Image: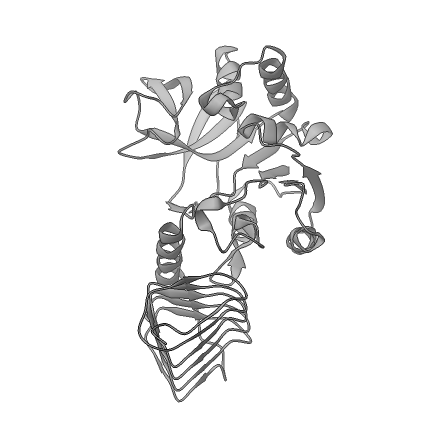
Amino acid sequence: MKLIIPMAGRGTRVRPHTHVTPKPLLPVCGKSMVERIVDTLSEALPRPLTEGIFVLGPDFSSDVRSSLDSICDRHAMAAHHVVQEEAKGTAHAVACAGDHLEGEGIVVFADTLFYMDPGIDLSDADVVVWVTHVDDPSRFGVAVREGDRIVELVEKPKTLISTEVLIGIYYVRDLSMLREAIDYLFEHRLTGVDNEYQLTDAFDRLLKQDRIFKTASVTAWLDCGTIDALLATTIDILGRENPPIPEDSVHESVVIKPVFIAEGASVEHSVIGPNVSLESGATLRRSVVRNSIVFSDGRVEGANLDHSLIGSSATVSGSPSSLNLGDHSSISPGG
């Protein structure tokens, strides 16, 4: 089974942490968002993933490709990289997969994280769409039902026609039929919301062709689309996973769980937690840090931080504060 992940977006709402690193590769408690998605699907799907097709932006570095290759290698998947030169919508992003759009596959947008139970039933369906209930669905695509049957898919409805939102995970029995539906949108210039080609419209075309649609649900759907959401999702995952503390990572310090401390990170003469993620190479010295993320090789010394995100290789020292500090930056709050 193929896995197609469009990830060419710039992640503007999570800046400054996406200036260098694409949002799907930001670590969340030791694993990038993409890695978590691949791990979850590998455990839940009834058949193994065999190929990963990643739709990248034109300026993505070789390091990005290497990271994706490593994830695929761990799952015995072949990795393919394709480029979306210009953002023209979700359907356009999927279309960039080109010749890979054939056979059985699953399309996942790497904007959110999720948990799902194993044993998903993909039988007797042309398309399976994952949905969840949201009180205000105006920012999402929705599935409209008559009884138990889906009759329409609508992107960002202006009126309340359904609270069952599409969460960006789609199983397709034959990707070539999805490609044909997208090609139809291109041929007839059928743009939707934001004057872009929307994948929801392509699926709605398949629905109108009497293809068999089913829905599936997740046990948790976690937003990572903003700074606040990324921090809230990290805290949620810490509570769910309660990761162990590596030996020799904490010295003369107090740990208030849940926290994540990566291999190679260190805590000295500090109080860490609750709800802190400390990525590889990060260090805390003579500090109190709670409800925060310190990315790889970040350094916090003599500081009291709460609700903060400290970028990779960034340095913080000084008085109490709440910060959102980008990569390779340095600051002394109150200094």
* Residue shown at the point (48%, 19%) measured from the top left: 192
* Residue in front for this viewpoint, 109 or 121: 109
| In the rendered image, the vertical position of residue 265 relative to residue 189, given as above or below | below
| In the rendered image, the vertical position of residue 286 relative to residue 97, given as above or below | below
* Residue shown at the point (61%, 37%) measured from the top left: 4
* Residue shown at the point (52%, 38%) measured from the top left: 109
With 250 as the anchor, is 80 left or right in this view? right
Taking the image as drawn, is residue 279 in sight? yes
Q: Furthest-front residue in view? A: 335
Residue 50, quarter of picture: top right
Taking the image as drawn, is residue 242 in sight? no
x and y percent of residue 13 in the render? Answer: 44, 46
With 115 as the anchor, is 105 left or right in this view? right
Position of the N terminus, as image quadrant, is top right
* Residue in front for this viewpoint, 11 or 262: 11
x and y percent of residue 60 in the render? Answer: 66, 47
| In the rendered image, the vertical position of residue 234 relative to residue 216, given as above or below | below
Position of the C terminus, as image quadrant, is bottom left
Q: How is the image coloured?
A: one colour
Q: Furthest-bottom residue in view? A: 252
Residue 268, quarter of picture: bottom left
x and y percent of residue 243 in the render? Answer: 43, 68
x and y percent of residue 61 in the render? Answer: 68, 51
* Residue shown at the point (71%, 42%) measured from the top left: 80
* Residue in front for this viewpoint, 62 or 162: 62
| In the rendered image, the vertical position of residue 99 relative to residue 292, given as above or below | above
Residue 303, quarter of picture: bottom left
